[in-house]
Image (cartoon, grey):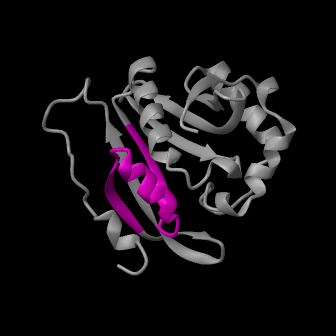
Amino acid sequence: MGDFEFVLLKPEDVEDEWQEWYEAEHTKYYTRGGRKISVEELRISVQKGLESGDMFTYGIQEQQNKRVIGTVKIGPIDSVHGLADLAVLIGDKQFLGKGLAPLIISKASELAFKKHQVRKLHSGILERNIPSIKAYTRAGWIVEGVLRNHYVNDGLTQDWLIISRFNPALNSKDIPTGHSVPPESFYPNK
């Protein structure tokens, strides 16, 4: 189940069946406010990214059946500062709970570093999204900060964890390697 590759998506590659990914319970934290994304919005985003050349959406293609099980978005890329957002969504429920997320995040980070010459990746995670906190930190990302009571999602005000990973090839050896806030402090039953 861990054999996959990333394929750059074009709008016509986005399948209508993917709509169920964005309506599933496990994706309620994918957007900060819990807004559901439509496949048409995804198609438009993919097209705009290709036109601008600063945002790339990849399908996570599992190799056994050659089907896309989720997406990786790199960008928008700030070429002046070498920064980019990275968002990963494993949409196919069959692939959840298998330990794939840290591997996918790690490989997607390497793709951003090598192919897109990103110096530093960043993202944000809602505090109640424990699986994502664990997956990103297991993939070598660090928690750089927390914006307290920042977003309202699922009717609850939640902290926003700011996470990042530096490209070791483009940064000096003195880059931060430790968490500013321990991710474990957000896990229930500490």
Identify which residue is drawn at 45% across, 40% down: 103
Looking at the image, residue 64 lies above or below residue 124: above
Residue 119 painted magenta: no
Identify which residue is drawn at 71% across, 26% down: 66
Identify which residue is drawn at 66% across, 72% down: 154
Q: Quadrant of residue 153?
A: bottom right
Q: Quadrant of residue 59?
A: top right
Q: Give 187 or 167, whichever is nearer the viewer.
A: 187
Residue 169, image x and y in percent?
Answer: 25, 23
Q: Quadrant of residue 23?
A: bottom right
Q: Is residue 179 left or right of residue 28?
A: left
Residue 53, image x and y in percent?
Answer: 58, 20
Span highlighted in magenta in the image: 121-147
Where, quadrant-wise, is the N terminus in this rendering? top right
Where, quadrant-wise, is the C terminus in this rendering? bottom left
Q: Give 75 or 130, whichever is nearer the viewer.
A: 130
Identify which residue is drawn at 37% across, 50% down: 138
Residue 152, image x and y in percent?
Answer: 59, 71
Residue 162, image x and y in percent?
Answer: 40, 55
Q: Is residue 185 left or right of residue 150?
A: left
Q: Is residue 181 left or right of residue 27?
A: left
